[in-house]
Amino acid sequence: MGHNLPKVIITTTASIDGRITLSRDARLIQPEAARRWATMKPDGADELLGSRRAEHGATVTIEGSGSFVDDDGPPIVLPNPELPESELRRDVIPRRTPLWFVVADSRGRVDWSFTGDDTTSLLILVCDATPLGYLQLLRDKGISYLNAGREQVDLEEGLAKIAATLGAHTVVADSGGTFNAALLRAGLVDEIDVVILPGLIGGTGTPSIMDGNPLGSTGLPIRTELIDAQITPTGMVRTRYRVINESGPKAEQRV
C-alpha cells in the first residue's frame, strides 16, 4: 500500500513453555490472576521489564480487545447515535499526551472506565463495521479513535495512521497471542523481545506467545534472526529477535 509504517516491536513475558497467562479465561489485569502469575517472577523481574519498556523508547503501546474481554462475552449497552454517521466515522483526537495506549476493537466490545491520564491517552482503532453506538460512546467519553479498515481493523492502515497522526516512530505491541499472530502474519513486525520467567503453566488452549489459526498445508514458519540473549542470575532469559519478513509491507528487499 506504500504506507509509511512505524517500527513495531512485540514485547511479551512468558513461562518456559511459552504461556503468557494462566488459562484461556484468566487475564493478568485481574488482581487474582496477576497475583498467581507473580509467583513465577524472581527478584529483579519488575526492574527488568521496566527497563525493557524504557529501552525501546516507544510512545505508543498497542493491544487487541481480546486482552480485556472474552470473544463470546455479552455485548455492552450502547447509546443511540446522536451525530450523523458521516461525523461519527471521522477520526477524532480530542486531546494529545506524550504517550498513547491503543486498542484495536472492530466490534466495539470494551466499555472503558480508564480513558487516560496526564501522560497517556487512550485511542481505539475502529473500522467501517464498528457499531455507530460504540463510536457515540467513545465521543461521549472523550476517547480518541481512528477508523482503519472495512469489515475489521486493517492493522497496516491503522499503524500508518498512528505514525501519521501521532508522530510515532516506534510502537510496542504488548498483547495476547492472537493479536501477536495477526501482526506477524501480516508482515508488520520488526522485532520480538521475549522475557522468559522460570516457571511452567501448561494446559491445552492456554494462550501462548503466538496463537491464531494454525498454519495452512503450505504455510511456512516465520523466520527470525537473534539480536541478543541475556540470562539473569535469578533464572530469567531475555531474547530479542529480528523478524525476517518474506512478504508484506516490510518484506526483505532481495536483489
Image (cartoon, grey):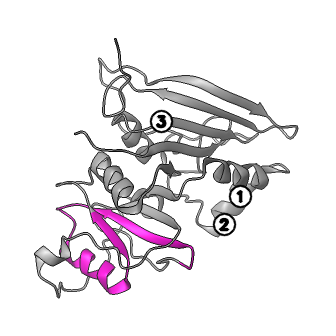
- For label 2, the residue is 32
Can you see residue 29? Answer: yes
Residue at 53% over, 51% down: 174
Q: Nearer the viewer, residue 229 or 168?
A: 168
According to the picture, the residue beneath numbered tag 3 turns out to be: 190
Residue at left 32%, top 76%? 76
**Looking at the image, which residue sits at the far right?**
233
Residue at disc 3, secondary structure: loop
How far apart are the alpha carbons under marks 3 and 1?
A: 32 Å
- Report the Cα–Cα distance between label 3 and label 2: 34 Å
Q: Residue at x 25, y 81 (%)?
A: 136
Magenta extent: 117-146
Q: Secondary structure at mark 1?
A: helix
Q: Is residue 105 left or right of residue 43?
A: left
Q: Amino acid at mark 3?
A: Asp
Q: Nearer the viewer, residue 127 or 206?
A: 127
Q: Which residue is mark 1?
A: 36
Mark 3 vs mark 1: give the one in front. 3
Percent x, y for residue 230? 76, 32
Establish if 113 lies above or below 207.
Answer: below
Relative image position of residue 220 (x, y in whole percent): 37, 19
Mark 2: few/some/many CA within 10 Å (<14, 14-19, 20+): few
The reply to whether discs 3 and 1 touch (Cβ–Cβ < 8 Å) is no
Residue 208: x percent and y percent? Answer: 53, 41
| Whole-number angstrom distance, CA of label 2 to CA of label 1 | 6 Å
Q: Is residue 120 a member of the stretch shown in magenta?
A: yes
Amino acid type shown at disc 1:
Arg
* 22 lies left or right of 253: right
Q: Quadrant of the N terminus?
A: top left
Q: Nearer the viewer, residue 185 or 52?
A: 52
160 magenta-colored: no
